[in-house]
């Protein structure tokens, strides 16, 4: 698969995920219209959909099909959207722009943004619990993975550690610990839950955990580099925010050149984690390279 074919592939997968997300949001009566509109504004308002795509690809690597992972993939995107909504709030990063549009609390109001984030987080678990294409045992395993990745030992814990580190000096090890939870945990959960949905054996799930850890790291380093040298228009958000906010980032702790080198090494390690797998893992290999190349 060359770079153009990958773009077409990613676009096609995005389409599948967006249809499924719209469908899952459309749950009839009983939801206050302002809350429903706020959830849709965030969940259907663009984004690369990289976490759900990874889940579909990992499912395919495990069992040949992607369909069993579709609900888990949507759940991952819901959790991701909630985290972005809350991260943009004045009490956190206070960002006015997200995905090229006003952030949710700017387009609506802070109270609605908090509630829409809460509702997306809880909907994620409902969606997997109600997924009829999964056995009860697989659904339970997926919910356990998602909640561990999102919660106090995962993304929320990483976010707190990041807040605590703001403005101070930290070591490379501490930086890695923060980001493996804040960004890495959910990306790892994407690869792992996709493999579980596809019926992957323990060994394959382990390979996906290793792969996910490396691409999660690569994703964060690239994100930090884009904040230094990226294009505001392509990113759909302001650049230079990390330095202004005294954030713990790879360029700040490792320097730009070494960050670029570590990014390359993480991609090599991610591909090595897939060793022994064949053609079925090709999209996962391409995604690892795409993460390092992305401009948004
Ligand atoms: C508020 C609980 C809570 C957690 C926030 C995800 C996060 C933790 C903060 C976002 C800040 C940030 C820039 C993190 C770095 C990596 C990241 C999650 C980038 C945004 O994800 P993309 O690039 O976004 O996948 P799109 O818009 O493409 O979905």
Image (cartoon, rainbow, N blue to C red):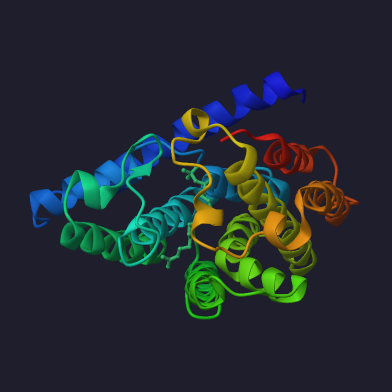
Q: Position of residue 187 (x, y in %)?
A: 60, 57
Residue 198 appears left or right of 239: right
Q: Could you tell me which residue is drawn at 73 percent across and 24 percent down?
A: 3
On screen, residue 276 above or below 234: below
* Image quarter of residue 161: bottom right
Q: Could you tell me which residue is drawn at 85 percent across and 48 percent down?
A: 261
Q: Could you tell me which residue is drawn at 17 percent across and 49 percent down?
A: 36
State the residue lying farthest toward the top: 4
Residue 140 appears left or right of 84: right
Q: Quadrant of the N terminus?
A: top right
**Do we see residue 220 in this rendering?**
yes
Depth check: 284 or 141 in front?
284
Depth check: 128 or 35 in front?
35
**Do we see residue 133 in this rendering?**
no
Depth check: 2 or 84 in front?
84
* Image quarter of residue 190: bottom right
Q: Position of residue 146 (x, y in %)?
A: 51, 68
On screen, residue 167 above or below 232: below
Q: Quadrant of the C terminus?
A: top right
Q: Position of residue 207 (x, y in %)?
A: 79, 61
The number of discs equals 0
Q: Position of residue 180 (x, y in %)?
A: 65, 67
* Image quarter of residue 246: bottom right
């Amino acid at each position: 698969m060359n770079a153009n074919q990958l773009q077409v592939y990613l676009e096609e997968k995005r389409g599948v995920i967006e249809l499924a997300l719209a469908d899952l949001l459309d749950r009839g009566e009983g939801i206050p219209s302002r809350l429903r509109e706020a959830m849709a504004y965030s969940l259907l308002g663009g984004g690369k959909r990289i976490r759900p795509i990874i889940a579909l690809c990992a499912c395919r690597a495990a069992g040949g099909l992607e369909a069993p992972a579709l609900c888990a993939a949507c759940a991952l995107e819901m959790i991701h959207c909630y985290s972005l909504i809350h991260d943009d709030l004045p009490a956190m990063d206070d960002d006015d722009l997200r995905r090229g549009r006003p952030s949710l609390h700017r387009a609506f109001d802070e109270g609605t943004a908090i509630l829409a984030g809460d509702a997306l987080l809880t909907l994620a678990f409902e969606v997997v619990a109600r997924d009829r294409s999964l056995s009860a045992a697989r659904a339970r395993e997926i919910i356990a993975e998602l909640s561990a990745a999102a919660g106090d030992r995962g993304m929320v814990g990483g976010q707190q550690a990041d807040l605590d580190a703001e403005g101070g000096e930290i070591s490379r090890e501490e930086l890695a610990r923060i980001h493996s939870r804040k960004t890495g945990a959910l990306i790892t959960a994407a690869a792992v839950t996709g493999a579980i949905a596809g019926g992957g054996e323990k060994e394959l799930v382990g390979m996906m955990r290793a792969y996910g850890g490396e691409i999660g790291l690569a994703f964060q380093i690239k994100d930090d580099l884009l904040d230094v040298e990226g294009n505001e228009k392509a990113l759909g958000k302001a650049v230079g925010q990390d330095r202004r906010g005294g954030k713990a980032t790879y360029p700040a702790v490792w320097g730009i050149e070494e960050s670029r080198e570590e990014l390359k090494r993480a991609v090599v390690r991610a591909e090595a984690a897939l060793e022994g797998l064949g053609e079925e893992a090709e999209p996962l290999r391409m995604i690892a390279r795409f993460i390092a190349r992305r401009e948004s």
